[in-house]
Image (spheres, coloured by chain):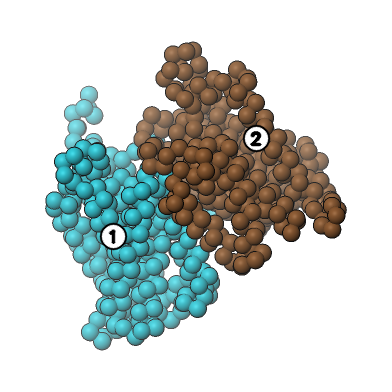
Amino acid sequence: MPQLLLNGIAIGCIYALVSCGFVWVYQSVGAVNFAHGELVMVGAYLGVTASVLLGWPPAVSLVVAVGAGALLGLVFQRVAYRPVRGRPALSFIVVSIGMSILLRNGALAVWGPDPVAPPDLVGGRMLRVGDSVLSAHHLLIIVVTALVFLMQALFFAGTRLGRRLRATAEDQETAQLMGVNVRAMIAWTFTLSAALAALAGVLVAPVIFVSPDLGLFIILKAFIAIVIGGFGSIAGTLVGGVFLGVIEVLTAAYVSSAYKDVVAFALLVVVLLVLPHGFFGERIGERA
Amino acid sequence: MLLLATLIPLALAGRDYPLFLATTAVIHALLAVSLDVVVGGLGLISLGHAALFGIGAYLSAAAMLGLGLPWLLALVAAGLGGAVAGLVLGALSLRIRGHYFVLVSLGFGEIVRLVLLNWKSLTRGADGVIGIPSPSLGGVAIGSKLGVYFLSLGVLVAVIVLTRRVRTSPLGRAAVAVRADEMAARASGVSPALVKLSALAWSGAAAGLAGSLYAHFYTFISPDVFTVDVSVTVLVMVIVGGAGTAGGPLLGALLLTVLPEWLRPFRQYYLIVYGAAVVLVMVFLPEGVVGTLRRARLRPRAALT
């Protein structure tokens, strides 16, 4: 049971990390990035390339993958977001769908269709606590996620860049008038969001196999986590992600693993109908 | 266009592969036209179209194989099933708007696919349904590829004609008003709920018909056919061709059915090009090919100077 709960919380933390980066972009530029899952997938592959193909130590691979992911986010922003900025929100939705097709099939061409599972970052160690055996990698995921959420809270509250990013998210025109370089802030937002996506990708790679379809799988789950937590809320992504992860693991263990995903999507519809604000969110249906 | 659609397949009679491709293009066109009722008509982006398509296909197969109904009734059942599923999606769209609806429609599509995959006693799960009979009219089976092609073309033309009719009716004009400004439309006595529900029901019915045609043409269906990829492809057809234009969805469906064949030598890279094309079209031709052409024709002077 403790092992089960730990697995659920760990996978939930991954959903939370993915959702958090997605919500950053949504909050600051009002854009729904359907290619966010593909940024996670490419991050996972970059980690696999560094650690398995090049044989670098896990910690180095992690840093390199997150750095390369951040760079990809910057390019993504320049190529996919900048040209349609100022057009209706649906334009960027369609462009990001195109980017997700491009990235998924690009990954297929580069890394092939066979799923790969890299070794985890702590050498597959297990910890014995009382009667139960806990995987150290799962614990690592939880610790890293806790650190990320703590750091981002401090970053947005206490640093100059963080406050300028928040000002941009609040009102781009006013921020511009106050001397904030809005273009640069948008670029920063996409870069940080993609770096977080790459981090989630590297962390999740040893837990579930990495394949070009990983992005689609993970973004669907992140959407559910975001809706449960409440659209647009950062704290909501953590609560929604962990809640979803635990529910999934319990369904798989006590009902049927085939219906794990059905339960997850049913949860999405039920939450939208019964509790449309999620746990913490803005009112659904107001923003178009 | 209709003349070409009639003559070319006649010339191809006897050559199976081009005819097979032409029928697939017609089924895609039916899907694109039905999705455009929602995208072009209401300005809503739906990523759940594969579910409506799949429900039609499974219902039609079940009606003929399970209940022994004639094909025409199976087609009607598929249309009704699609309409009911469309109404469910429509009811969701009343509560949830904008990009939330994109997510919810995506979730809806996934739920339907997972149910098709896991409700094994009804759908035979991942094995799929094999040996679906060919269509028949009045007890005469239409076994030939050419026959199925013209049957599909007939359904497509009927759907297009009906959709045009509705578009110029009071209900269609109400849809234009709702799309432009929901609040103002409501103030003028238009019911946005009625407009949205009827548009999604009609869109679902047409997608259900496409599902039925697909099932009896391919004679095999499985949950793998009705994935998010189909929803995305059909959406891309509508957007690339031009949402809300008369010929746009048709052109988009034709292009995206034939293009993969032309790009066959680059098979592995085709989908990369395809993704890039979606981005480029959206950036440079935001109104799609047909939409942009129409705009260019409307103001030729401005383009010259």
Q: Quadrant of residue B197?
A: bottom left
Which element is circle 2 on?
helix
Q: Kindly identify the residue that appears in the image at 37 percent across and 44 percent down.
A: B97
From the rendered image, report the letter of the chain displayed in cyan. Answer: B
From the rendered image, report the letter of the chain displayed in brown. Answer: A
- The label shown at residue B201 is 1
Question: Is any part of residue B21 visible from this angle?
Answer: no
Q: Is residue A160 above or below residue A209?
A: above
The location of residue A227, given as percent across then percent down, is 50, 46
Seen from the viewer's position, the closer of residues A49 and A199 is: A199
| Kind of residue at badge 1 | Ala
State left or right for residue A116 relative to residue A188: right
The quarter of the rendered structure image containing the N terminus of chain B is bottom left
The location of residue A77, given as percent across then percent down, is 51, 32
Disc number lying in front (2 or 1):
2
Q: Chain of mark 2?
A: A
Q: Quadrant of residue B60?
A: bottom left
Seen from the viewer's position, the closer of residues B116 and A100 is: B116
Q: Which residue is mark 2?
A: A149
The location of residue B143, given as percent across then percent down, is 32, 81
| Kind of residue at badge 2 | Phe
Q: Kindly identify the residue that appears in the image at 33 percent across and 47 percent down.
A: B44
- Residue density around tag 2, few if under 14, some if 14–19, many if 20 or more, within 10 Å: some
The location of residue B56, given as percent across then percent down, is 36, 69
State left or right for residue A137 relative to residue A156: right
User: Given contact means CB atoms under 8 Å apart, are the residues at marks 2 and 1 in contact?
Assistant: no
